[in-house]
Image (cartoon, rainbow, N blue to C red):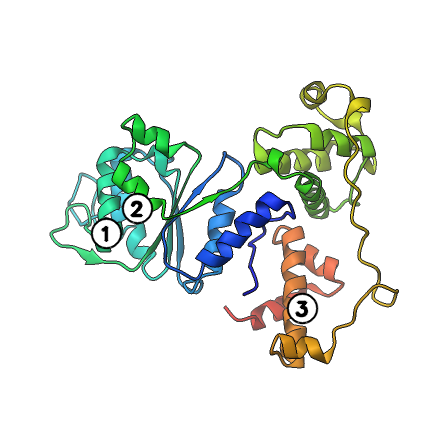
Amino acid sequence: MDLKSNGIIGHSASLADVFRILLKVAPTDSTVLVTGESGTGKELLVRALHNNSARTDKPFVPINCGAIPKELLESELFGHEKGAFTHAIRSRPGRFEVADGGTIFLDEIGEMDLSLQVKILRVLQEKEIERVGGAGMKKVDVRIVAATNRDLENEVSQGRFREDLYYRLNVIPLHLPPLRERDSDVLLLAEHFLARFCVRKNRPCLVLDPDVRKILLAYPWPGNVRELENFMERMSILVDGEVVHPGDLPVKILETVGDIAALPEPAPRLAPAPPLLQRGFVWPTLADLDTHAMSLKEFLDTIEDRLIEEALEHADGVKNQAAELLGIKRTTLIEKLKKKPG
């Protein structure tokens, strides 16, 4: 099974371990608990889990349990009947009903009130929900994936999270490592974000000075991937030349890493892929078609789809910029997207 990584970028060993578990658990209906610091990309990982599952053509419904007042969260999750409370002027389905057949993502579940945790436990055990103000139960076929940046074992010991719910959620634990533990992924991500933002802002792609590369590797990135992404957007706006120099970096980062001359050199970069007609490129063979059980058209369509996805990712979904990266007209790209299944 080929992994649809859903935009998660990295080659570090710690991330590869996550992908190995994801590939095994995605085809199942097992409940998954994703843990990791804020900004590590937990929702991207959960979307990848959904997109590699048998439910990929069904709804993916996220809800941030910490962003909705606790008195409204029950209605958001389970829906309500007309007249259930003051402003309930009509009946409304909740997120569990909307997600029927698919996946519901309970983000920041550690923020959920204890009284509501009991009802989530019932959904896990009985596969049924009851709307606020309702008089009967409704069956739902939903895979539940939860995420938190809290230590739920500690929350259980402190009486702030139900132990029985914790064990029902923690069937398959997936821990997304912080950026500081992902080695050279920092530079891979930095260059990816920088290229994407430069394309979006219609400017030549910026290059990272060798000292800047050392600094980016040495900085601990407490805000993780989200902080790095925001920082690269800032560089794409504020840097005047074509190279990002140490002087372009904030004082906070420079002070954190200390003496630049004392910082270790980055590991050697992999050589870029050579042009098609130069030595080193391996042309596909008939054996490749046989290995993947594909016809020529299926093989070429797969290659085209992946290049289009990468171009759209670099262009942040902006089709005219993606078309420019691919060297085709925007109308041609749109036609190709229309022909893609789903």
Q: Earlier in the sequence, mark 3 or mark 1?
A: 1
**Residue bearing mark 2:** 168
Proximity of marks 1 and 2: CB atoms separated by less than 8 Å: yes
Going by the numbered disc 3, the residue's amino acid type is Glu
Going by the numbered disc 1, the residue's amino acid type is Gln
Work out how far the residue at label 3 is from the one at label 1, CA to CA, in angstroms.
44 Å
Q: Would residue 45 be seen by someone viewing this image from the given angle?
A: yes
Q: Secondary structure at mark 2?
A: helix
Eye-nearest disc, 2 or 3:
2
Q: Residues within 10 Å of mark 1 (few under 14, many from 20)?
A: few
Q: Earlier in the sequence, mark 1 or mark 2?
A: 1
4, 199: nearer the viewer: 4
Eye-nearest disc, 3 or 1:
1
- Residue 131 picture location, percent across and down: 20, 49
**Residue bearing mark 3:** 304
Give the label on residue 125, or none. Answer: 1
Farthest residue, direction left: 135
What residue appears at the point 65 percent right and 48 percent down from the top-left corner? 11
Q: Secondary structure at mark 1?
A: helix
Q: Would residue 48 be seen by someone viewing this image from the given angle?
A: no
- Residue 80 picture location, percent across and down: 21, 48
Q: Residues within 10 Å of mark 2 (few under 14, many from 20)?
A: some
Q: Is residue 147 above or below residue 335?
A: above
